Image: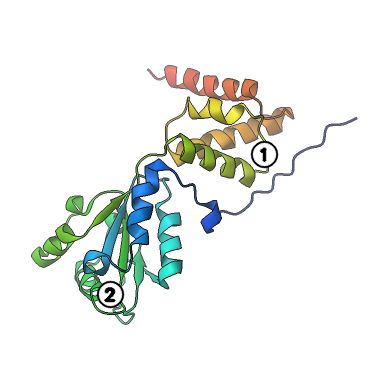
Amino acid sequence: MPRQLRLKLRRPATYERDDFAAGPSNAAARAALSAWPEWHGGAMVLVGPEGVGKTHLARLWAEAAGAVELSPQDPDLSHTGPALIEDVDRGFDEEFLFHRINMAARPGGGLLLTARTAPALWPVELPDLRSRLNALPVAEIEPPDDAVLEAVLRRLFARCNITPHDDVIPYIINRIERSAPAAWEVVQRLDAASGESHRPVSRVLARQVLEDETENLDLFE
């Protein structure tokens, strides 16, 4: 009988609470965000490298707080309630951010900023803004631990409609960079390799994919 082909239908990413990969690496950040609205000055900065779940966690906070997402480049100050501003370290309007931080401390306010780096590293010209940023509490998400990386891999395989063999995920965890982008890259490569050869996603296939990656890197050394 001919083998049944897996449909290449990707499930969209979601930001549901049950889909968040909780673990020791993000426990401190989760606790810090859950303390709202008792944040000092009404504002918080959520920091962490790419792909550790900042956006997911920030949107869960925004849902709970009834916050509106704003652009860091938008000078509009008409919204006075809780606000979420993402990727602040990629550029922002200084006057706008200064006023948003001040507004966060007012009754009914609140402000969550997300960034890959701490506020001390953001280029700022306004002295008053620099002092505000230095005073903000910071919650940090660390690179994924084993529990988080396993949950991330399971979610990514599910997005690709892949059910890997039981020993595949532990094998991958011990051999890839500890980041969600690295996990997504290996899942896509396994998806492509299994689709081309009509093979199940097994440890053997995972080893071949990862060893091929290592060999390709060696060519450039």
Q: Nearer the viewer, residue 105 or 96?
A: 105
User: Which residue was labeled with disc 2?
Assistant: 75
Q: Are marks 1 and 2 in contact (CB under 8 Å)?
A: no
Q: Position of residue 112 (x, y in %)?
A: 32, 63
Query: In this figure, which colouring scheme has been used for the structure?
Result: rainbow
Q: Nearer the viewer, residue 149 or 196?
A: 149
Q: Secondary structure at mark 2?
A: loop
User: Which residue was labeled with disc 1?
Assistant: 162
Mark 2 closeness class: few <14, some 14–19, many ≥20 residues within 10 Å:
some
Instruction: Tell me the kind of residue under disc 1.
Output: Ile
Q: Is residue 134 above or below residue 193?
A: below
- Residue occupying the point 34% across, 42% down: 142
- Residue occupying the point 30% across, 78% down: 76
Instruction: Tell me the kind of residue under disc 2.
Output: Pro
Q: Position of residue 167 (x, y in %)?
A: 61, 26
Q: Secondary structure at mark 1?
A: loop
Q: What numbered label is drawn on residue 21?
A: none
- Residue occupying the point 61% across, 32% down: 190
Residue positioned most to the left: 127
Q: Nearer the viewer, residue 31 or 125?
A: 31
Which quadrant of the structure image shows residue 221? Answer: top left
